[in-house]
Amino acid sequence: MTTPVAPSGLLRYLPAVYQKDPFLGRFLLAFEDVLIGRDDAAPGHEGLEQLIAGLATVFDPLQARDDFLPWLADWTAFTLRDDLEPRQRRNFLARIIQLYRLRGTKQNLQDLLAIFTVGTPTVTETAAADFELGVHSTVGVDTYLGGGAAHFFRVTISLPRASQEAQERQLAIATALIELEKPAHTAYKLEPIFPSMRIGVYSTVGVDTLLGAVLP
């Protein structure tokens, strides 16, 4: 048995002589569906009034639909990688204008890496690493006799243990960001650090433990 469809609520705006016309009640359903939406409409369907009322969310990266994020990125002259999670895309777009003001700086690069990678990034400018016991004291790593190489910096990212594919993906993202954001005259070295030995958990050298903990 077919359930009767309630007449359009737009009937109440017509003169009384038309409000009891069953044909008009059905005819106006289409306009009601397009203009203001209906309670019995399909999930996700909205009328024009609802769309206009929620227009501000389209321009908010934290509230916009996932398919709007690439469009918002175009406004900031940036192309989002397809392999980024929606959360990473939203966090980046929410901060991109502020980050542009710091473009080319150490702080900007660290902030970007913190958004797009799952590890903890550290950017070290070798020329600024003076000898200081307990802070900068390992020659060739964080201390350079006579000063470090000019226009050179190191990027260290502590990544969690994951599959080889996931680790390579994180490194690819980090490399792309560094190449995009670093000043053209500078050089760098990316050094990923992964979890090392933990007795009873990660302790088989060459299988689940890497001495030196740097992925080739």
Image (cartoon, rainbow, N blue to C red):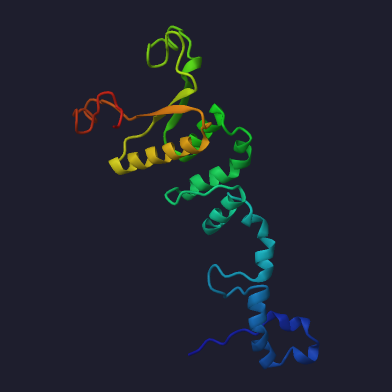
Residue found farthest to the front: 185
Instruction: Please identify the quarter of the rendering in which residue 41 is found.
Output: bottom right
User: Where does residue 145 sit, x and y in percent of width and height?
Assistant: 42, 8
User: Where does residue 189 sit, x and y in percent of width and height?
Assistant: 40, 27
Answer yes or no: is residue 214 visible.
yes
User: Where does residue 88 sit, x and y in percent of width and height?
Assistant: 49, 45
Who's the residue at 45% across and 15% down the image? 148
Who's the residue at 42% across and 16% down the image? 142
Answer yes or no: is residue 156 visible.
no
Who's the residue at 60% across and 73% down the image? 39
Q: Nearer the viewer, residue 188 or 213?
A: 188
Q: Nearer the viewer, residue 186 or 177?
A: 186
Q: Is residue 187 above or below residue 144?
A: below
Quarter in which the C terminus is drawn: top left
Instruction: Please identify the quarter of the rendering in which residue 18 is found.
Output: bottom right
Q: Is residue 7 above or below residue 150?
A: below
In this rendering, the count of numbered labels is: 0
- 84 left or right of 207 in image: right
User: Where does residue 37 sit, x and y in percent of width and height?
Assistant: 63, 73
